[in-house]
Amino acid sequence: MAAGDHNAVIRAKTSINFLKSYNCTLPVEIFHFSSELSGTDKAFLKDLSQLGDGEGAEGKGMKVTVRVVEGLEKGHGWKDFHIKGAAIQQTSFSEILYLDTDSYLLRDPTYLFEGPQWTETGLLLWPDYTKSHATNPIWRLLGQKCRNEYEGESGQILISRTRHQDLLWLVEYFALHHEEYYGFMGGDRDSFRAAALLLGKKWAGPGRLNAAAGVALPNDPQGGGHTMLQADPEGKWMFVHANLIKHGSFPKPLWAKIHRATNDKFAQGTTYGSIEPPNDGIGEGVKLHVFADPKLVTEMSVFEGFDQGLVTVDDWDSYEELKRFEEKWFAFGGVH
């Protein structure tokens, strides 16, 4: 993780509390820039380093370490995009699950390091809602034809540093020269997929597309989306990436509705990263609309001329793995 301001530190604590509740014993490292924290936040981070103490599964405790990114200072943009690649490079781990502090796990992620997708590729990426248009300069940079594929979303990345050191060097290069590259990558968001494509590397990912989840709004059957819901390789929801909830105030329950593409599952035995038929038609006709007024929310809809049935709206509690998430989130220190 990377946590460099007070709100991010609070989210990191919530995320660690979730991991502890699953008896997860994976060690955690939290990175920040040397110049960005107040004295209060530094004390909070020191408390975080003790948060993992205690007995977990098989009598082991979760070790939490707070570290300063070396050789790099905080930039002046509204997001610290360039810390992500550096943090992954400088971690003491060789097999890494990087999490944004607002991407909360629904269960112990240890099994992700044991599945066939990880064994075969050493790289799991998760999709965003959008695809790169054929006119995007990214394709000229890569020297490739436009792929009928969703862009990457870097709120969660599973990567073997020993198998993909070259990819990480390239991601860091993009970050150091972000003025040139991030404009058509959405920041660091799609830089990992771009690097993998440029180097000819295969990756795996979730067994279904992400969904938009959020509150129930009057006169709107879909509700106001503020969360990217991401799945594991088997298609079971795994990450609650609440990336917009920090930008507004929402009524409870915060998580009530899920809107997703009806055709959102990759063919059996395949995941994100495969664009072979029938995966090239997954999510076809569905788009995400972002509303900025009166608050920043998302909503899935269909392109003109497509059947409205291409979008499905589910109740949050209709999925067993999502039940009681909000209750735990508040109990573990979640704020919005």
Image (cartoon, rainbow, N blue to C red):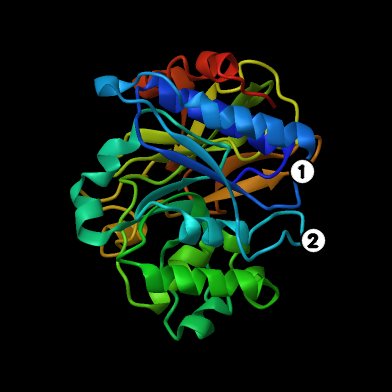
Judged by depth in the image, the label closer to the viewer, 2 or 1, is 2
Q: Is residue 158 visible?
A: yes
User: 219 or 154, which lies in front?
Assistant: 154
Image coords of residue 251 (percent x, y): 70, 18
Q: Residue at horizontal 58%, vertical 37%?
A: 102
Structural crowding at the residue carrying mark 1, measured as other residues with C-alpha within 10 Å and reported as few (<14), some (14–19) or many (≥20): few
- Give the mark nearest the N terminus, 2 or 1: 2
User: 227 or 80, which lies in front?
Assistant: 80
Q: Residue at horizontal 32%, vertical 71%?
A: 201
Q: Is residue 219 above or below residue 76?
A: above
- Check disc 1 and report its element: helix, strand or loop: loop
Q: Disc 2 and disc 1: Cα gap in Å?
A: 24 Å
| The C terminus, quarter of image | top right
Residue at which label 1 appears: 292
Q: Is residue 146 above or below residue 230?
A: below
The residue under label 1 is which amino acid type? Ala
- Check disc 2 and report its element: helix, strand or loop: loop
In the picture, measured across the screen, residue 261 lies left or right of residue 81, that is left
Q: Which mark is residue 76?
A: 2
The residue under label 2 is which amino acid type? His
Q: Residue at horizontal 21%, vertical 45%?
A: 115
Circles 2 and 1: CB atoms closer than 8 Å: no
Q: Residue at horizontal 70%, vertical 52%?
A: 34
Image coords of residue 60 (percent x, y): 31, 25
In the picture, measured across the screen, residue 40 lies left or right of residue 105, that is right
The answer to which image quadrant residue 124 occupies is: bottom left
Q: Is residue 152 visible?
A: no
Structural crowding at the residue carrying mark 2, measured as other residues with C-alpha within 10 Å and reported as few (<14), some (14–19) or many (≥20): few
Image coords of residue 122 (percent x, y): 28, 58
Disc count in the image? 2
Q: Is residue 242 above or below residue 118?
A: above
